[in-house]
Image (cartoon, helix red, strand yellow):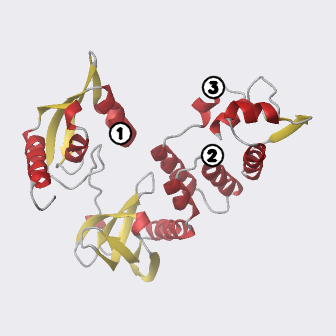
Amino acid sequence: MLRLMQMLSSNVNYSVDDLMKELDISRRTVYRYIETFKSAGFAVQNTHGNVWRLANLKNKYGDLSNVVYFSEEEAYILNGLLESLDNTNALKQALRRKLVAVYDFEAVGEYVAKESVSKNMEAISTAIRDKKTVLLKDYASSHSQATKTYRVEPYKVNTNHIDMWAYDVEDGINKRFKTARIGSVEILEEEPWQHEEAHVSLQMDDFRIHGETPVHVRLRMDMVARNLLLEEYPLAEKNLTADGDYWIYEADCNGMKGVGRFVLSIPDRIEILEGEEVKAYLKEKAGYILSSKAL
């Protein structure tokens, strides 16, 4: 679909037959994609005969892929930004349809399609604005490996809307909750915040881990590992520097759950220059993998 968009917006007039040949797809598929673009709100026009054009995009980039392509994580973030718009915004739903139409990522499609996520985030945003306590119902907790209801004071939603900070009234501590794991949200109108002074957002590291003792880590990696790092953890870019044909990553990481798992995923392409805790983590996991329990 991206290649078809590029061809329809180029300076060449392609007929449907040309598109079939260049993309190695059927006539039916060409027209199906064109209808998909139309339904998503793109301006696709039949100029003459069986020649179709996408309305010109006036931009300085030249290659359309530089303008419209997003990684899966970028698409999540973009959807989060759209989610923050008021539901009365006329452009919101049109933009979301375009996102899903162009980026056929199953996870993004499910995330955008779930009305419950949108309703939950709207309720949480309202509760934060009005400083109300809420019930997070049917929350699927990885920690307890069970589904339960939490009575919390939500006070901060992260910019990508993937998670949020809230004060757990029962446990008396701040926790980070994944928004996709929330079944539903009930605002307790008669229960205003009682613990606002305790609301603190803990700093997350580049691997999205918080709450652990910071450990200084310095890694030397090749281009393959560097690319994987940036694809999976875009925030790590600010702590990367070039070192000849290699790259150095240096930062404080919150425990080993994030950085340790990353190194473990591609250990033959990463050298640990600093961080004995990382080495210990790798030895522990390697021992488990080689044990009878794992096998």
Left-right relation of 159 to 10:
left
- Identify the element where label 2 is drawn: helix
Q: Please tell me the numbered disc located at residue 157.
A: none
Residue 206 in the image: state x and y as whole percent.
29, 43
| Front position among marks 1 and 3 | 3
Residue 267 in the image: state x and y as whole percent.
20, 37
Residue 212 in the image: state x and y as whole percent.
17, 54
Residue tagged 3: 63
Residue at 49% from the left image edge and 50% from the top image edge: 76
Residues at marks 1 and 3, CA–CA distance in whole angstroms? 26 Å
Left-right relation of 131 to 274:
right
Left-right relation of 47 to 261:
right
Residue tagged 1: 235
At label 1, which amino acid type do we have? Answer: Leu
Q: Earlier in the sequence, mark 1 or mark 2?
A: 2
Residues at marks 1 and 2, CA–CA distance in whole angstroms? 25 Å
Residue toward you, 36 or 87: 36
Residue at 27% from the left image edge and 50% from the top image edge: 203
Left-right relation of 6 to 272:
right
Q: Look at the picture and state if 95 lies above or below 2.
A: below
- Where is the C terminus found, in terms of image quarters? bottom left
Q: Look at the picture and state if 207 lies above or below 244.
A: below
Q: Earlier in the sequence, mark 2 or mark 3?
A: 3
Q: Earlier in the sequence, mark 1 or mark 3?
A: 3
- For label 1, the crowd category at 10 Å Cα-Cα, with few meaning under 14, some 14 to 19 and many 20 or more, is some
Residue tagged 2: 102
Residue at 28% from the left image edge and 24% from the top image edge: 241
- Where is the N terminus found, in terms of image quarters? top right
